[in-house]
Amino acid sequence: MESSYIDIYCERVGPEFWSEPVNAGTNIAFIVAAFCLVRMILRADRPIRRDLVVWVLTLLVFLIGIGSTLFHTFASRWALLTDVIPIAFFILIYTWYALRRLVVAHAGVCALGVAAVLGLAMVVPPLTGFRGGSYIAALTALIAIGGFLSLVRQQPAGPALLFAAAVFAVSLTLRTIDDPFCDALPLGTHFIWHVLNGCVLFIVVRALVLFGRRA
């Protein structure tokens, strides 16, 4: 009989609601990141406080925390959607506005960048068997945009994005080894993915708030 719950992380050992307490609990990192972003935005000048884009991104950080908590407790298909949909929206929206406001690219270049992220996210799984195609796409975008800003524009957001990319690379590695090292680490390593990614999302949104050139 096919399992009625999704069991893809080391910590989960059964269908019960609280079978992933550490994975579920560490989603507080996203909530804290969203709270810190709200405080930063409210303390900024009026144009930033009235900037819908940074509020949408901050809301998505919060929703990522809520969705991931739902998935690591209910472990169902509908809960999985609450986890992955806010992440997908965040990646695509952030790619557009990082190109638009940090690189100061034309709308056509922004559209190509978003299309490239989507394309890479779609081709990675069938080509490599790695299910996290969207994460590889996001990491590639961070490195590309951060590298361009650092090396070509000497823009202060560049080092911030590259630092976020480095943290995200470590985070993605730990997410990937969660299952293969399950016997040695019964708790798994996925919970560290949550903690580090809360930091990554704070860093990248902060960079957009501080260094983004708004129209």
Image: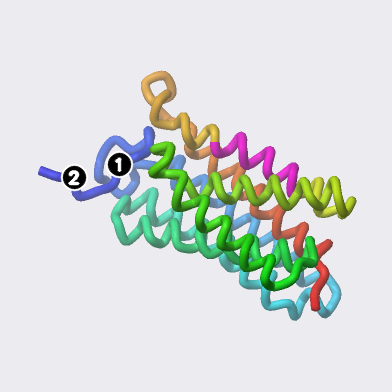
- Residue 201 visible within the image: yes
The amino acid marked with disc number 1 is Asp
Q: Residue at x 39, y 48 (%)?
A: 72
Pointers 1 and 2 in contact (CB under 8 A)?
Answer: yes
Q: Secondary structure at mark 1?
A: loop
Q: Residue furthest left?
A: 1
Q: Which of the two residues, 52 or 133, is positioned nearer the viewer here?
A: 133
Q: Is residue 198 above or below residue 96?
A: above
Query: Can you identify the residue that label 1 sits on?
Result: 7
Q: Is residue 1 left or right of residue 34?
A: left
At 75% from the left and 59% from the top, the residue drawn is 206
Disc 2 marks which residue?
A: 3
Residue 115 is tagged as none
Which residues are drawn in magenta?
161-172
Q: Is residue 166 magenta?
A: yes
Q: Which residue is drawn at the image coordinates 48% and 60% (left, top)?
A: 66
Q: Mostly what secondary structure, the magenta segment?
A: helix
One can see residue 58 in this view: no
Residue at x-position 54% and y-position 44%: 136
Image quarter (top left, top right, bottom left or bottom right) of the N terminus: top left
Mark 2 element type: loop
Q: Position of residue 19 (x, y in %)?
A: 33, 42
Residue 168 position within the rendered picture, expressed as x and y whole percent measured from the top left? 62, 42
Please say if 146 is above or below 91: above
The picture places residue 18, in percent across and down from the top left corner, at: 34, 46
Does 53 lie within the magenta span?
no
Instruction: Point out the image quarter for the C terminus.
Output: bottom right
Where, by quadrant of the figure, is residue 202 drawn? bottom right
